[in-house]
Image (cartoon, grey):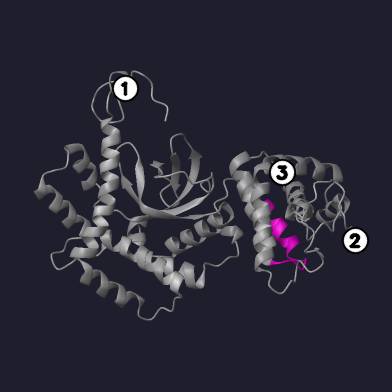
Amino acid sequence: MDISRNDPCPCGSGKKHKKCCMNDTVISLHSIRDRELTELQGELLTYALTQHEELLAVSYEEFIQEIDLDEDEEELVLFLFTTWSLFSILDDTDQTIVEQFINKKKKENKLRASTLEQLEKWIGATASFTIVTKIMEDLHIEVEDIFTEEKKIVKLQEEDPGIQEGVGLVGFLLPYGSYDSYYTMYLDFPENEAVILKNEFQAMYDASDVKDSSILMRVNFPSIMVSMLTEGFDERLDVDQLDWENPIYHAVAQVYKQHIEHFDLPEQIQDLGVTLWYIFCKKEQPTIRKFKNYAAALHYYIDHKLPILNFLTQADVAEMYEVSKGSLAKAYKHLEKGLEDELDKLYDFMEQMEDEDEENIFFDDYEIDEDDDEFDFEDLFSFNEEPKNQK
């Protein structure tokens, strides 16, 4: 985080940064509070499991009794349900577990005032679904709530290479002073899945009678998590419900979908084009005069970059979309440059599809010698302008 010498020190001491924590010889009150709050996370869970074991067990049994889960799913659901219970379930005193824990800490009178002040702000915490908008220094990231669009600075407890811009995070954010921190853990979703989940969550919120998204998450979080694990949200992207910042971006996606659906391709590949276009628009905010040029470029991009395709030439796609080859090529170069960072994620997507393609429906044309130690899945991706298999 960028803090100048004369800014108030983030530790909350009231001193200027240069006269407080900037000096390595001064023990940072901010760091001490950080450590104490993290220790209190563990203490809260221990308190709940020892002092409210029956309440948690009965509540979970009532919730899970008609839900069929495998062993791994139940372990995750149990932990998430327990976490949710700490902040949401009321006992016969009409208090949540976190409220009773805080009252216990007040009576012990051992916490420093700044730590207790932040601990009291944990009351009423709800699960949130956020999108990572910025990677910062010292384990800090910026996230944006999908419902309220509120941005928060979050400090991770440890390095996580999977956390990149565009990744979706679901968890319970707790105030730590100048930033928030996730309670014990979070669920992370890659960018392409995050776009779909954001769409589904928004549709759920719009269909409800609830005006406050935090109430929706407080009441429905356990059911939402079970649905994601057992039923899965609808994996088809609804182009009309995505948050397009410009109507012409929406038009590109619609035209692309209309054309791509005529091809006998997996739904995941059809939707991949929409996902990549959505990401491109968010990052580049392109100025577009003729949307068909970009719809054609998107179609050619998907066909050209995926190894199981490569069927069409630029001339084929230009004729299909009724645009000039030159206009398509110009839009394609813009698209290719803007999505350069997404190619690694595209590789991961294809490897996942290969792993899930148990019947070899889409990959049986590739005869791979199992004894060929030099084979690399990335060799299947073509970066040449001319397609390999023209039809």
Q: CA distance from mark 2 to mark 1?
A: 67 Å
> Is 106 or 287 nearer to us in this picture?
106
- Residue at left 55%, top 53%? 190
Local crowd at mark 2 within 10 Å, few (<14), some, or many (≥20)?
A: few
Which residue bears the numbered disc 1?
17
Residue at point 17%, 38% (across, down): 112
* Closer to the camera in the image, 148 or 95: 95
Q: Name the residue rendered at 48%, 69% in the picture.
A: 229
Identify the amino acid type marked 1: His
Confirm or deny contact between disc 2 and disc 3 (CB under 8 A). Answer: no
Q: The N terminus lies in which quarter of the figure?
A: top left
Q: Secondary structure at mark 2?
A: loop
- Seen from the viewer's position, the closer of residues 305 and 204 is 305
Residue under label 2: 391
Q: Nearer the viewer, mark 1 or mark 3?
A: 1
* Left or right of residue 285: residue 227: left
**Amino acid under disc 3:** Leu
Residue type marked 2: Lys
Q: Please name which of the two marks, 2 or 1, marks the residue nearer to the observer.
A: 1
Q: Secondary structure at mark 3?
A: helix
114 and 125: which is toward the camera: 114
Q: CA distance from mark 1 to mark 3?
A: 44 Å
Q: Position of residue 337 (x, y in %)?
A: 71, 39
Q: Earlier in the sequence, mark 2 or mark 1?
A: 1
Q: Mark 3 sits on what residue?
A: 335
From the top left corner, tell me how far across and down residue 12 is, in percent: 25, 30
